[in-house]
Image (cartoon, helix red, strand yellow):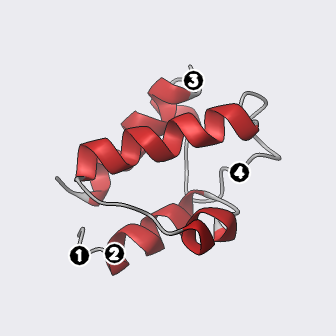
Amino acid sequence: MKLDDVNPIIAKVFSLPESEINDESSPESIESWDSFNGLVLVDELETHFKIKFSISEITDVKNVADIKRHLKNHNVS
């Protein structure tokens, strides 16, 4: 499990081509990134990486780079 797995998971959750996902992708740039799909994404990431995000980590996420930063804090590289 590595950070390279993040973009394919995001693409799957938001039904987008992986080529459209980058570190700057955010709810503002991805139409399907609403509060419900945001929770689906958290669940998919926690399941895949076998981690648990804190509420503060979840609410801190503004874009894909933030997700990767928090995963690094959980020793995902």
Q: Nearer the viewer, mark 3 or mark 2?
A: 2
**Element type where label 3 sits in the image:** loop
Q: Position of residue 4 (x, y in %)?
A: 29, 52
10 Å crowding of disc 1: few (<14), some (14-19), many (20+): few
Task: Find disc 1 in the rendering and name its residue.
Answer: 75
Helix, strand or loop at label 4? It is: loop
What residue occupies the far right of the structure in this picture? 28
Pointer 2 residue: 72
Quickly name the residue at label 3: 16
Residue 67 % position (x, y): 50, 62
In terms of sequence position, does the residue under pointer 2 or pointer 4 come before the other? 4
Q: Earlier in the sequence, mark 3 or mark 2?
A: 3
* Residue type, numbered disc 4: Ser
- Between the residue at mark 4 and the residue at mark 3, the CA separation in whole angstroms equals 13 Å
- Three-letter code, disc 1: Asn
In this picture, residue 20 sits left or right of residue 19: right
Residue 56 showing in the rendered view: yes
Which numbered tag is attached to residue 26?
4
Of circles 3 and 1, which is in front?
1
Determine crowd level at label 3: few under 14, some 14-19, many 20+ residues with C-alpha closer than 10 A.
some
User: Which of 57/64 is in front?
Assistant: 57
Secondary structure beneath disc 2?
helix
Q: Residues within 10 Å of mark 2 (few under 14, many from 20)?
A: few
In the picture, the quarter occupied by the C terminus is: bottom left
